[in-house]
Image (tube, helix red, strand yellow):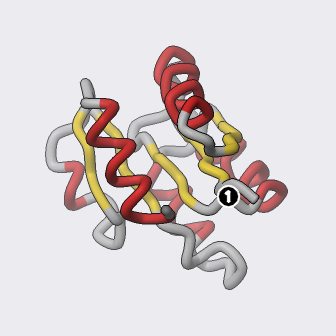
Amino acid sequence: MSKKIMVVDDDQNIVDYLVTLFEDNGYETCSASDGVEALVVMKDEKPDLVTLDLEMPDEWGPRFYRKFNQDPELMDTPVIVISGLSGIHLAIRKAVATVNKPFDPDQVLKIVQDAIG
């Protein structure tokens, strides 16, 4: 069974790009456009990894991270922060990686492969 990656970003172009990148490399995907939607999708889909933007409407990335990190079933899910904000490495200290936008797709794919195979 292939691993599932959830893409959380309010920029639909980024979501479409990452979903295509991951699916073209054999991963299943799901997505959400903000932290509120992401929490619902995450509980339903139980992804193996999350790529997370920090700055989104309604509920931004770090708050979503804190919420899902309190759920014993979800708390060990690895997170890759992908954001255009400066200082992103400080936002979620337990992230497996932080990547600045614009990003190199090969770099993101290598991080994913190192994190979940």
Q: Residue at x 61, y 42 (%)?
A: 26
Q: Residue at x 42, y 56 (%)?
A: 113
Q: Is residue 25 left or right of residue 72?
A: left
Amino acid at pointer 1: Pro
Q: Quadrant of residue 39?
A: bottom right
Camera-nearest residue between 63 and 80? 80
Q: Quadrant of the N terminus?
A: bottom right
Q: Secondary structure at mark 1?
A: loop
Farthest-out residue, bottom? 72
Q: Residue furthest left?
A: 87
Q: Which residue lies at the image location 66% right of the left edge and 52% below the top edge?
A: 4
Which of the two residues, 82 or 27, is positioned nearer the viewer here?
Answer: 27
Residue 47 occupies quadrant: bottom right
List x then y, in percent, for residue 9. Answer: 51, 33
How far from the left and from the top, in percent, is residue 60?
48, 45
Say above or below: 14 vs 85.
Answer: above
Q: For mark 1, what is the residue? A: 47
- From the viewer's perspective, is residue 66 above or below residue 73? above
Q: Residue at x 46, y 49 (%)?
A: 61
Rendered location of residue 10, percent (x, y) = 53, 27
Residue closest to the far top: 13
Q: Residues within 10 Å of mark 1 (few under 14, many from 20)?
A: many
